[in-house]
Image (cartoon, rainbow, N blue to C red):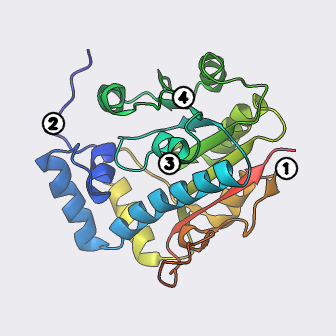
Amino acid sequence: MTKIDTSVPHSARIWNYWLGGKDNYPVDEAAGNAYTAVFPGIVTVARGSRAFLGRSIRYLVEEAGVRQFLDVGTGLPTVDNTHEVAQRLAPESRIVYVDNDPLVLAHARALLTSTPEGVTAYEDLSLYAPDSILEAAGRTLDLDRPTALILSGILGHVDGYDRARDLVQALLSGLPAGSYLSINDGSRGTDPAYEAAQDAYNETGAVPYFLRPVTQIEGYFDGLDLVDPGIVSVPLWRPTKDTATPTPIGQHGGLGRKV
């Protein structure tokens, strides 16, 4: 078993801390606090991303009729994970999570449970192996039926936009017409303070996360039919009626349907 180093801050554990999760250590809390001291809005970004994920899954289940989900780059389980939202609305939903972080693997097997009517599986694979992901997902999902591909906050870890876009296309190529792509990722052009804080973080030697222009995030959806309102800052994507007036943040996303 791969040893988990608790003496060095870890991006997945820091994100978990910002989301209010418990799967982190004092070193992660310290790193998270250091980041928020420079840019307090990072907590809003993290939670805005998670809220978008929930609203997009609700749309996929209730309005698009999707019952299969391929969530790549799962991250540490917190609250309202993909399977929890989907199976709460449609207990028969089938979900495959994919990540290759040993820390995520250690927690996923304990926390990612399923309803009796549905299925939840976890595959220990890298985003950089799309063919292996599709092959593994096909053991749980019927990839002849519409499937939602979820890439939440993961593409910013890919060094090089062309490479990130190629990975998206490779995964989509294995899914049939009627499938959906859900992406939300850190963006440039909305919040200069966020951009400065992230650029500084990337210079520390930690695993970098690259914020990308909104036009590049839109490019992931080329050839797909966008669900209204298109690619927007995530709080503006189909906000619920009981939320306060949404404020744009440096996180953009949307849903697109493969035709």
Q: CA distance from mark 1 to mark 3?
A: 28 Å
| Residue ID for mark 3 | 85
Label 3 crowd bin: few (<14), some (14–19), many (20+), radius 10 Å:
many
Q: Secondary structure at mark 3?
A: helix
Q: Earlier in the sequence, mark 1 or mark 2?
A: 2
| Residue ID for mark 4 | 117
| Residue ID for mark 2 | 6
The residue mark sitting in front, 4 or 3, is 4
- The mark total stands at 4
Q: CA distance from mark 4 to mark 2?
A: 37 Å
Q: Is residue 169 above or below residue 203?
A: above
**Residue 143: image x %, image y %?**
73, 25
Q: Earlier in the sequence, mark 4 or mark 3?
A: 3
Q: CA distance from mark 3 to mark 2?
A: 31 Å
- Residue at 33% over, 33% down: 111
- Residue at 54% over, 28% down: 117
